[in-house]
Amino acid sequence: MAECRICKEQIDKSANDWIMPSKNWYYHKKCYDNWKKAQPDSDEQYVELIYDFIARDLKVTYDYWVCEAQRKKFLKEKMTNKGILFALKYFYEVKHGDWEKGHGGIGIIPFVYNDACAYWAARERKSAGTIAEIERQMREAAERKKVTIQKKEKPKYKVDFSVLDDLEDDE
């Protein structure tokens, strides 16, 4: 059984009233929706979007504890969660970086952070509202209903060799 990260009650995974926006982060759907609505517009809201981007958009596996340690280190170096998110978007979507070289972490951020800031600032100057539109799309994607696909089990065939014995006797 899993535990809701908000209300701390057990989640019945057989019911359809729970979600997992990031790996091993379980919530009751109602708790999560209320929590999202109550969040102020702060830099902390981008933390979940960082992990959501890695898991849903890049579709790669990551080491949460490595990423979290790196993210906290970057915050001490005067970077922001929003900046980290957009640096990831810049490196992997614009520059087509290779996730495998990062060994499950986000250590590339200090090397691309300033270039990413310049890129997004120039893009915002060219067409005002680009950043806000990307943020809106990412929030909508994070709030979208997740569909679970269950793989059907293939039927196992039995071979009846007695039929072959009968064929040999007919000759």
Image (cartoon, rainbow, N blue to C red):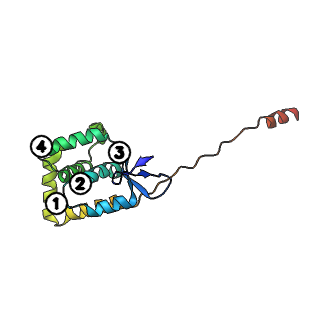
Q: Which mark is residue 77?
A: 4
Quadrant for the C terminus in the image = top right
Tell me the mark number nearer the camera, choosing from 4 and 1: 4
Tell me the mark number nearer the camera, choosing from 4 and 3: 4
Disc 2 and disc 4 in contact, CB within 8 angstroms: no
Query: In what element is the residue under mark 2?
Result: helix
Q: Amino acid at mark 1?
A: Arg
- The crowd level at tag 2 (other Cα within 10 Å; few <14, some 14-19, many 20+) is many
The numbered mark, 3 or 1, whose residue comes first in the sequence reads 3
Query: In what element is the residue under mark 4?
Result: loop
Q: Which residue is mark 2?
A: 46
Q: Amino acid at mark 2?
A: Tyr
The numbered mark, 2 or 3, whose residue comes first in the sequence reads 2
Compared to 159, does 42 lie above or below? below
Q: Real-space Cα distance between discs 2 and 4? A: 17 Å
Q: Real-space Cα distance between discs 2 and 3? A: 19 Å
